[in-house]
Amino acid sequence: PTAQWTVTGAGAAVVGKKGTGPRVIRATMGRVIDMGMSDPFNMGGAMAPAAVDTIQAHFRDFGIDASEYDVIVTGDLGRVGHTIASDLLKKHNMPIPEEKFFDCGMLIYGDDPTVFSGGSGCGCCASVTYGHFMNRMRNGEINKMLVIATGSLLSPLSYQQKESIPCVAHAVAIEMGEGGMSQ
């Protein structure tokens, strides 16, 4: 099934000019991608092309590839959207190794089959990034990650009118800074 469960969660980060711990080293603003999909029960499939477009732009604009990061994480594509994103990246000769490519929507509920394709909503990316992945940074397991937050421009009215679902994704590269993380 392509359906996902909405996550009620939140996360926040304080970004400043000074301090210790993780730091933002790069960012890529995505562009709106509309593949003509109109099924609100397949949001991962609708958002995957936007995530891939942003990843491609990030790598191209900064002259890097997947080897630059320890992990590359998308927001809430779920199992279906993550598979589509992986396939699209391979098609565009930008494969990301499976062991470093994750989706917060897949991770938030684990392998629970009752949530179908995984979690959905902005709570996925925020909770998993600022919880799970920041803990991995704190523990020294990862030093540099690329986080691609995914989203759609969908409303109850546009759904009822059977309009397509335009999507967008923005990327932020985070690196462990000098001095590590304070507890």
Image: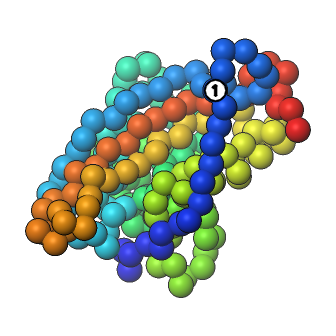
* Number of marks: 1
Task: Locate residue 14: give its quadrant.
Answer: top right
Report whether residue 161 is seen.
yes
Residue 86 vertical position relative to residue 41 in the rendered view, above or below: above
Residue 160 horizontal side relative to residue 155, left or right: left
Which residue is located at x 38 percent, y 20 percent?
61
Which residue is located at x 24 percent, y 41 percent?
32
Q: Dot 1: few (<14), some (14–19), or many (≥20) neighbours within 10 Å?
A: few
Report whether residue 102 is seen.
no
Residue 99 vertical position relative to residue 177 in the rendered view, above or below: below
Residue 68 horizontal side relative to residue 171, left or right: right
User: What is the x, y in percent for residue 156?
Assistant: 25, 67
Quarter of the picture containing the C terminus is top right
Outermost bottom residue: 114
Residue 127 vertical position relative to residue 61 in the rendered view, above or below: below
Quarter of the picture containing the N terminus is bottom left
Task: Locate residue 30: give its quadrant.
Answer: top left
> Considering depth in this image, is 27 or 84 the residue closer to the camera?
27
The residue wearing badge 1 is: 15
Task: Locate residue 128: give its quadrant.
Answer: bottom right
Q: Secondary structure at mark 1?
A: loop
Residue 157 vertical position relative to residue 70 in the rendered view, above or below: below
Q: Amino acid at mark 1?
A: Val
Outermost top residue: 17
Residue 72 horizontal side relative to residue 40, left or right: right
User: What is the x, y in percent for residue 138?
Assistant: 81, 39
